[in-house]
Amino acid sequence: MLKTTIFGLSALALMSLCTSGLAADFLADRHAANKVQCSGCHVETPPKLAVPTAQCQKCHGSYKDLAEKTKNLKPNPHYTHMLDQPCEECHRAHEPSVNMCASCHKLDIKVP
């Protein structure tokens, strides 16, 4: 019994150690590091899987504002032929974000 308990605790500690570096890559963790509470994005209880774009825009601005902020990126991911996409198309809070543009184009854009 003691060996099983020690093994289980060791496995949990190892999993925590291995995933702790990855968690900083998640958008939710970066928000938390900037002292944004979960309720700053999730306004409903229980939280939904994706935060509505309108909620993101309360802090980050309109699509036009975002396109201006990222105007020096080539290509500008917020000024596209896809028009106004929901933020969660690329930005994932609790899992790795994705480069939606790469589903059609050969673009190496790092999505935070």
Image (tube, rainbow, N blue to C red):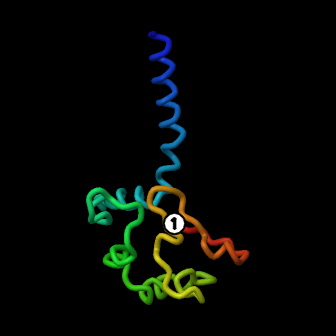
Q: Nearer the viewer, residue 60 or 97?
A: 97
Tell me where residue 56 appears, x and y as whole percent: 37, 74
Residue at the (54%, 58%) spot, across then down: 96
Q: Residue at x 29, y 56 (%)?
A: 46
Residue density around tag 1, few if under 14, some if 14–19, many if 20 or more, within 10 Å:
some
Q: Which residue is mark 1?
A: 112
The image quarter containing residue 66 is: bottom left
The correct choice, above or below, for 63 with respect to 24 in the image is: below
Q: Amino acid at mark 1?
A: Pro
Query: Would residue 11 be found to the left or right of residue 59 on screen?
Result: right
| Number of numbered labels in the structure image | 1
Q: Residue 80's spot in the image, x, y percent?
A: 58, 87
Q: Is residue 31 left or right of residue 90?
A: left
Kindly identify the residue that appears in the image at 54 percent across and 63 percent down: 97
Identified at 63% across, 76% down, the residue is: 101
Q: Estimate the x, y position of residue 32 in percent, counting from the top left.
A: 35, 57
